[in-house]
Amino acid sequence: MAEKKICEQCHDEKDIDLFRKVTNQYTGVHPMSICKECYNRNNEDRKRRQEEEWQQNAEERKQRQAYQQQSEEREAVRAARKAAWEAEERRLPESNPTEVTYHAWIYAIRKQGSYPEPTERSGKWLIFLSAQSIDRYWAKIKEAVEQGQLGEQTKVSTRSPASMPPEVRRKKEERGDTRFVVCVYTYDYADEADVMRVRQVLKELGIQREIIYKADADTRAGSYGADYTPKYRA
Ligand SMILES: [Zn+2]
């Protein structure tokens, strides 16, 4: 009859030759006497916990690497966008409006002759044109401004969404309106002779149908669409 003893872990009575002396896992010092089954189970538990820990570490490492890769990809996209923006800026003065996506406006200014400084009554003729015809007309208007046949400056919208307040743009898109706009500035709407002289030149460039003249003060006041009365229609 083998001698029996109580296991200090499971508290079952077992044959004494099946006992192991182990370090007390709680205090770390006082040895415990436990049965073989508990001893084996403890070892398996420990092994399983260690494997879980390794797996968790590997998972965390993988996540860190994925995050790092995403950051690098985002950075690459940012750098590419910046390079494209800069390349577009360099060729902007000579670009067609339909080819520009990063910059809201292309400007052209007078290169010949002189023209009065803008007053507080400055404004512009607005010429709305489809994507099919904007490039052709912009080239003509730009040249006319540069050669001193119109006012001091002109600008044209592009494919960039930034050329108008977001709310105005949203309404425009809701109407299915994909037109571009050319602004041909004059220094003072009270100088009707000059306003109409510019209108006549635009007519000669092919802008036959009625267009409107809007005061810059109305634009600064945020008036778009039906919110303002054009100074002229011609
Ligand atoms: Zn036990």
Image: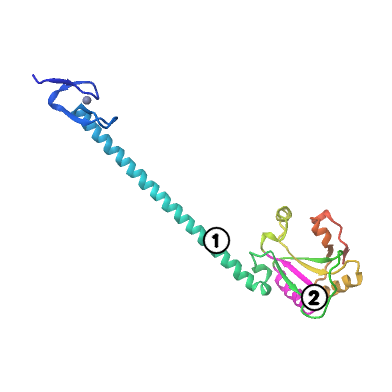
- Residue at the spot 72% in from the left edge and 70% down from the top edge: 107
Q: Position of residue 70 (x, y in %)?
A: 47, 55
Q: Point out the stretch of residues depicted in magenta.
A: 132-158
Q: Residue furthest front?
A: 29
Image position of 169 with respect to 45: above or below? below
Residue 41, numbered circle: none
**From the viewer's perspective, is 81 left or right of 148?**
left
Residue bearing the label numbered 1: 78
Image position of 43 (left or right of 115) = left
Image vertical order of residue 177 relative to residue 42, above or below = below
Mark 2, residue position:
205
Which kind of residue does numbered mark 1 sit on? Arg
Please state the total of marks drawn on the protein image: 2
| Snapshot quadrant of residue 141 | bottom right
Residue at coordinates 81% horizontally, 69% vertically from top-left? 185
Decide whether residue 154 is among the magenta residues: yes
Q: Which residue is at the front of the view, 203 or 1? A: 1
Residue situated in front as seen by the camera: 187 or 143: 187
Q: Against 163, is 39 above or below?
A: above
Quarter of the image containing the C terminus? bottom right
How far across and how far down the image is residue 32, in percent? Answer: 22, 27
Q: Is ligand 1 within 8 Å of the beta carbon of the residue shown at mark 1? A: no
Along the line of sight, the residue nearer the viewer: 208 or 214? 214
Measuring 36% from the left and 45% from the top, which residue is drawn there?
57
